[in-house]
Amino acid sequence: MGSAMSRGRTVRRGVARWRAGILLTLPSFLFVFVFLVYPVANLVHTSFRDFSPLRSSASPFVGFKNYDWMLHSDTVWHSLGVTLAFTVLSVLVELVIGLLVALLLARLVMEMKSAGARFLGKAANGIFILPFAAPGIVAAVAWKMLLHPQFSPINAILGVQIPWFTDFPLLSIVVADAWKTMPLILFLALSALLSIDNAQFEAARMDGARPWQEFLFLTLPGILPVLAVACAFRAVDAFTKVFDIVFGTTGGGPANDTQVFPLLIWQTAFSNLHFGQAASLSIFAIVISAGLGWFLMLFRRVR
Amino acid sequence: MRKRFRPAHLLRTLALVVLLLATLLPIVWMLISSFKTEDEIYLARPTWIPRAPTLANYAALFNQFGFARLTLNSLCITLGVVAISMLFGTMAAYGFSRYRFPGSAVVMGALLLTRMITPASLVLPLYSLMQVLGLLNSWTSIIIGITVLNLPFVVWMMKPFFDQLPHEVEEAGELDGLSPVGVFWRTAVPMAAPGLYSIFLFSFVAGWVDLLFGITFATTPHATPLTAGLMQMQTGYRIYWGPLMAGGIYLSLPTLILAFFFQKSLVSGLRVST
């Protein structure tokens, strides 16, 4: 009888829990459904139409014309190439600098004995996170000023007169973007570094290991999984989300040399007002995002 | 022994200080420039200390560029994003963490994929939707655009915090006769406070820094956020460098201050979100 009662309660609780689960997740689900799933479905609809609101409010069905344009447009492929180059360079710069800073900070934290070192460690933590919190548009205008052809302080320090955003446009947006996103790699690497068991280093030192051997055989394997995941996430974000930095500096120029894919979508829609073409580009971007996202999920599971 | 380590130690500290200064340079240069007169900004040999420090650029933000209204817009948009993201996001994260129900895995997976979506690809269809709903040029449209991308992120970030919580306290709450929703609100939410700080910070930053939806959905100062205001200071004809730098400082100050003081929460959020 006791067991029957408890079973009854479990079942009741089971149903209550089931209901609670749906109740708790329903608002988010509805929100995302109405403002994401429905718009994306609408996007598919638009992508099969010739819709240029500037020219006419009519939007005749044109089949795969927009997709055909997309697959054969030099602008589109050029943009994808630019985005890929931007992604690779940006993640590379972030990784090198982020890792370097993380290693320096980790040593500082581990050897923190003097009050000065402790202060430097604390201040460094607070300062290195700042670019991450700076609005993208602010990073853009700050670097636009720093690299200005006429009054750049960096040019003044180097004693040169280089119009960075004109002569090295891709490199310039990479620097601005890497500055802003480096803290992500830095702090993930730092927490991984600090969680490596110190006893391993002591044992290695007892065995007469050199510093570079320590780095290669202890430090690097210890943080590699974290670094790999962080870089994978950063790469996907760089590829799919880069916008503010370019929009606020070069606007895609000179001559489309920095027209990254998200910017191409926006400009096709809201500068050229080709909604149909922009819709097909958006669908393409969503397919890429889904593919990359799926890849990230697998990657996380493997880790 | 001690002596042998000293130079390396000094070198490392020096390298760290140089990297710190390089990291600060864009913000510091912006700050310096924001106090300069227009003539001084245009000097070919830039000065590191303003010769005649002035607040004219900051005054221009409000007199010339309507920053009072833009600030109100940015604040309300950010509050909207934070409120919806935190309420809905916390509920959903808890739901996914504690309950299995038909379709929960699929919905969770779909939410996570949303995290990867290209924001620019959503602007056009949301623009059309807002047009139909008559919401263009309103805070609401911008809030919705930002939140729909932030919400999945919040769920994804908050779920691990609930996963870590011990079930015992909630079970005790259940035995005391609390409903599942009561258990969530009275026991789980207070215990997940560190996670709440993180998602507050991320949602605040997401709302405050958004440019994409602000610049697309807002057509008049009625709804334009500060970020879009900064873009408007760079017209094709001229760039108002002084006010632009002042505006950059003004816009980034709230998030910089939050980040500096809540660095730990931000980093712990980063850690669970990758």
Image (cartoon, coloured by chain):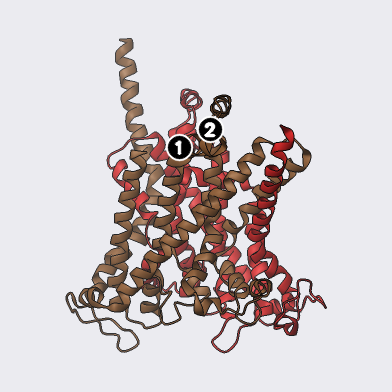
- State left or right for residue A52 relative to residue B38: left
* Residue B232 higher or lower than B262, as above or below: below
Chain letter behind tag 2: A
Q: Which residue is mark 1?
A: A221
Task: Establish whether labels 2 and 1 are both on one chain.
Answer: yes
Instruction: Give chain A's shade.
Output: brown
Going 56% across and 28% down the picture, which residue do you hit?
A208
Position of the N terminus of chain B by quadrant: top right
* Residue A97 higher or lower than B58, as above or below: above
* Residue A11 higher or lower than B264, as above or below: above
Could you tell me which secondary element the residue under label 2 belongs to? Answer: loop
Instruction: Give chain B's shade.
Output: red
Category of crowding for the residue at label 1, using alpha-carbon neighbours closer than 10 angstroms: few (below 14), some (14–19), many (at least 20) = few
- Which image quadrant is residue A35 in? bottom left
Residue A268: horizontal and vertical position, in percent? 36, 78
The residue lying toward the viewer, choosing from B103 and A145, is: A145
The residue lying toward the viewer, choosing from A29 and A161, is: A161
Residue A91: horizontal and vertical position, in percent? 46, 57
